[in-house]
Amino acid sequence: MTLWLLPLLPILSGVIIAVMGDRSRGRLGGLAVTVLGGTFVLALAAVTQEWTAYLIWSDALRLTASLTPISAAVALMVPAIALAVVFHATQHEQARGLGRLTGIMILFTGGMELVVVADDLLTLLIGWELIGACSWALISHKWRDIENPRSGLYAFVMTRFGDLGLFAAAMALYSATGSFDYAGIATLEGTFQWIVAFGILLSAASKAGQVPFSPWLFRAMAGPSSVSALLHAATLVAAGAYIIARLEPSLSLAPGFSVAAISIGLITALAGGVTGVLQNHAKRLLAASTSAQLGFMFVAVGAGYPGIAVLHLIVHATFKAPLFLSAGLAGDAAGSYRLDKMMLGQSMPIVGGLTAIAAVGLAGMPPAGGGWSKEEIIKAVEHTGYWLPIAVMLGGALSAAYTTRFLLLAFSWRGDDERSIEVPGRMETLGLGILAALTLTTSLLWYPPLAEAFAALLDMTLPKGSPLMLGLSLSFVAAGVLGGVYLVRRHPTLGTSGATAAASDWLGLSKLITIAVVRPIDALARTAAWIDDTLIDAGPRGVAFMGRKGAAFIAEVDNRVVDQGIRNTAAFGDWLAQVSDRFGETISDGIPEGSARLTGMLGRDIRRLQTGLSHHYYAYIIGGVIAVIAILAAGA
């Protein structure tokens, strides 16, 4: 049995469902459950039976797929999370365009599965491109609002810039080894090794929303909440952290890779934490938290614990997806994503309760699985000294602060609430409930034998940490929770105006990118367009001008000479015709008329000769004889 079935089932099914168009919510929900449930079964079979696959394009190019312990765990996680999220989308999102949305989300899941099973950079690139295109289509789903396609394009271009690193890595690997196989990365040295390692790191950072690429995650919030949940929990963003964890044994051989990964992750975790605390937009707060949490994963990879990073990736998916779904339900109910305008706990107690379960995981608090995996990351960096673990703890405190603020502002009780809130139905909360149950399940990881058994499945050993660091870390979390409560009570509108509002947009990074990158590139593009229009196009325009002038001259000559000659010829012909008509009439009519008159005159004269008198006739005869004699005499 081929491993290609795992990505192909959702890819082909997604295309068919998208082409089918809109159907009833029940039918689309059934199709989503069937396809993604089947994908999960295929993933389970592939993992247990160790499926592999390859496709030979030519002697030089071949696509390969296989599963390592890390990729096997992610291959199971992706359809499990996607099933609940896509089903929620079929029950909650707008009916118009729902078939297309459902199909592309399933296709998106298939693309992610192709990324996960890839065993070479060429196969990875195909999956990478597919999820990039799907993310653009999904962010731009509500395309009738012109800002949404623009946001989709912004996110697409930003991640595409990072993708250049993956293309460079693929070309360098092929140039050095004659193959795209992952196995060849470990054999590289020198420049090729550096290009491959940092090219992949650049591409992973852009997909994962790490600094300086983080602002695209805010623009991606233009998509439906279900899309945000899938994108942040199980597909595009997760792909960035997954790929460097998958290739860490080879990438870490490159000098500077580990330090770079830790630096990028730590800066993003702290910047994302501060941004999340200052944000008043529910979905953007969660987007900033995604960057921060994936920053922790980059730190774990850089510290040499890719398995810990993947564990946090899986746990993160279980609590981040329900948080986005609940944010969507709250935003639709309140008519706005402004946290200070929500406070929907009284109207939506079930959603609020399910959100609280997931929020405990994001806050990194025991007994949630999110708390356990975050503590494992701190253990993983303990061997580096004190500063790095404390920096990660600070990031954890910020996580606790923005999560507390999110939960209390979105779902706290409001005594004087007289709003008419449309409460989501049972089918709309079903997906949220399934994901909250998964979040609760991950709490079992706090039980050491179970955690060690799970780690063994990933072919890894859990790091050892000190009780002192654990106590210190939990103190940071407690401080973060208290800080979040303080901000809600004292500054409920934090981030809505003034300096905090400006800082909530990635601490001014978005504006810096606009000033330092977007505007210069835009100016360069305008200059190039001006050069093209003014200079390069000047030649063709000059030829066209001369052509027009030449044509005008020829037309003038034609009017003045040729046409005038024709007109004169016509006038001469008319004159000649008139003359001919006048003389012709005279001649043609005069000849017969003159002949007739002469004949008439002769006839009348001859009739005078016929008098009937004999002596007249004798005289005529004598006269004739005399005339004959005279003629003869003259002839003689």
Image (cartoon, rainbow, N blue to C red):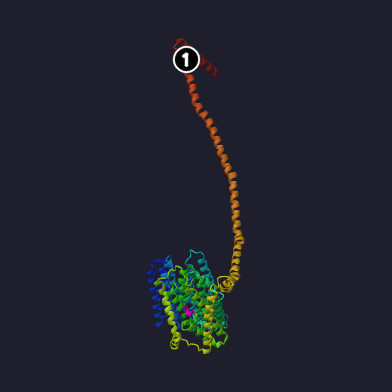
- Residue 474 x %, y %: 51, 85
- Residue 514 x %, y %: 58, 69
Q: Is residue 562 above or below residue 478?
A: above
Q: 533 left or right of 239?
A: right
Q: Is residue 480 above or below residue 215?
A: below
Q: Nearer the viewer, residue 238 or 93?
A: 93
Q: Is residue 249 above or below residue 419?
A: below
Regarding mark 1 in the picture, which secondary structure is present there? helix
Residue ranking furthest to the front: 416
Quarter placement of the C terminus? top right
Q: Amino acid at mark 1?
A: Leu
The residue under label 1 is: 609
Quarter placement of the N terminus? bottom left
Q: Residue at x 40, y 83 (%)?
A: 48
* Count of marks, rendered view: 1
Q: Nearer the viewer, residue 18 or 57?
A: 18
Residue range in magenta is 358-362
- Residue 246 x %, y %: 49, 81
Q: Is residue 122 visible?
A: no
Residue ranking furthest to the top: 615
- Residue 615 x %, y %: 46, 10
Write down the quadrant of residue 453 in the picture: bottom left
Q: Is residue 185 above or below residue 534?
A: below
Q: Is residue 352 visible?
A: yes
